[in-house]
Image: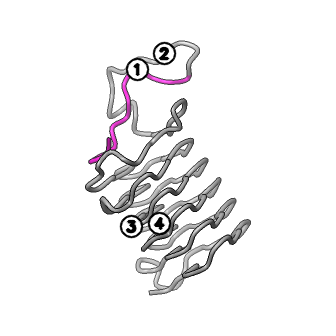
Amino acid sequence: EFVGLNLWLSNNNTISGNTFDNLPGAHNSLGIVIGKSIGNNISDNVIKKTGEGISLWNSADYNLILNNIISRNYYCGISVSKSSNNKFIGNIIRYNEDYGIFIQDADSKDNNIYHNNLINIFEGAMNAMDKGTNTWDDGKYGNYWSDYKFKYPNAKKIPSKGIWDTPYEVEDGS
């Protein structure tokens, strides 16, 4: 398995302005891995044609994933496992084959996911075994889902609010 950048036991780093494209063994590769690390800022990167774009594993807590372009990955754009209190804001996640964002387990909690654009993905998000502790908005704004009108054909746009009257349901999410 090839990893573009591995932050393991590495705290308070800023990773910004990089391009990870078509890594060797792309189907099994990982763009950026964060494991047992806190306080990292992953922003303004382009990650495409990997197995997973950004992966948070094993107590990757209190990290900020901000304004990245994550596209054409074989499995998912962002994967979270046993990691909590992270923020995912303003990312463009598009054309991934399976999931845009995949929260893998109930041990991944109190993550905040908002202002992201999930575009043309087989399944926008999966919040496996969530106990309602991850939030998919900031209390005012949520995420953009390109399949919204298809999934909710009877939804109505609320005038001058920029939102619709039917919340987007994340599979197994709250």
On screen, residue 153 versus residue 20, left or right, reads left
122, 164: nearer the viewer? 164
Q: Secondary structure at mark 1?
A: loop
**Percent of width and height locating residue 56:** 47, 68
For residue 107, what is the image quadrant? bottom left
For residue 6, what is the image quadrant? bottom right
Q: Which mark is residue 73?
A: 4
Q: Amino acid at mark 2?
A: Ile
Which quadrant is home to the N terminus?
bottom left
106, 161: nearer the viewer? 106
According to the picture, the residue beneath numbered tag 3 turns out to be: 81
Q: Amino acid at mark 1?
A: Asp
Compared to residue 29, the image places residue 90 above or below, namely: above
The boundaries of the magenta stretch are 162-174
Gap between marks 4 and 2 measured at Cα: 34 Å
According to the picture, the residue beneath numbered tag 1 turns out to be: 165
Of callouts 4 and 1, the N-terminal one: 4
Asked if one can make out residue 33 in the rendered structure from this viewpoint, the answer is no
According to the picture, the residue beneath numbered tag 2 turns out to be: 158
